[in-house]
Image (tube, rainbow, N blue to C red):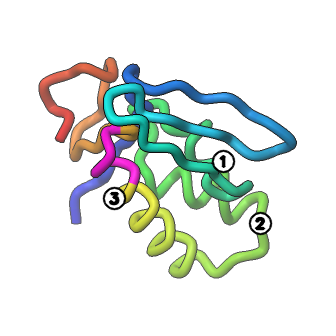
């Protein structure tokens, strides 16, 4: 199974308030409030770290959650935000949020 890499889009506005991240796509005004787990994924979305490693280190390392469940939930979260242009997803490391490998 290929690795999944994620990066934050540059076409978004994001602010943290009271431990939750508020994220909005400036293109279509889609708005999300991220819980603690989703915020941890968001912060770790550097385009170079595989999602599997983000889940292991940032989610399972901080929260009491089953690794398989954490991975499935993270993949679902990534798919949803990528469909709104908030996260960029690739099977190759993203060296910038506008690389041609982004899908």
Dominant SS in magenta: helix
N-terminal label among 2 and 1: 1
x 56%, y 72%: residue: 70
Q: What residue does disc 1 label? A: 40
Compared across the picture, whether 83 is left or right of 41 comes to left
x 15%, y 32%: residue: 101
x 22%, y 66%: residue: 1
Residue situated furthest front in the rendering: 29
Q: What residue does disc 2 label? A: 63
Which span of residues is magenta-colored? 81-85
Please determine whether, in this image, residue 94 is positioned above or below residue 10. Answer: below
CA gap between label 1 and label 3 equals: 16 Å
| SS assignment at label 1 | helix
Q: Are marks 2 and 1 in contact (CB under 8 Å)?
A: yes
Determine if residue 74 is in view: yes
Image coordinates for residue 75, horizontal then vertical, percent: 40, 64
Residue situated furthest left in the rendering: 100
Q: What residue does disc 3 label? A: 79
Image coordinates for residue 73, horizontal then vertical, percent: 50, 71
x 33%, y 58%: residue: 79
Indicate whether residue 83 is drawn in magenta: yes
> Closest to the observer: 18 or 49?
18
CA gap between label 3 and label 2 equals: 21 Å
Compared across the picture, whether 10 is left or right of 18 comes to left
Image coordinates for residue 48, horizontal then vertical, percent: 40, 32
In this view, the mark in front (3 or 2):
3
Packing grade of label 1 (10 A; few <14, some 14-19, many >=20) is some
């Amino acid at each position: 199974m290929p690795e999944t890499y994620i990066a934050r889009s540059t076409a978004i506005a994001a602010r943290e308030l009271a431990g939750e991240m508020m994220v909005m796509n400036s293109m279509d005004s889609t708005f999300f409030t991220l819980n603690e787990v989703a915020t941890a994924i968001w912060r770790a979305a550097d385009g170079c770290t595989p999602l599997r490693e983000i889940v292991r280190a940032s989610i399972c390392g901080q929260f009491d959650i089953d690794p398989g469940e954490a991975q499935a939930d993270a993949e679902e979260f990534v798919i949803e935000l990528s469909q709104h242009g908030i996260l960029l997803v690739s099977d190759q490391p993203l060296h910038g949020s506008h690389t041609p490998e982004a899908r």
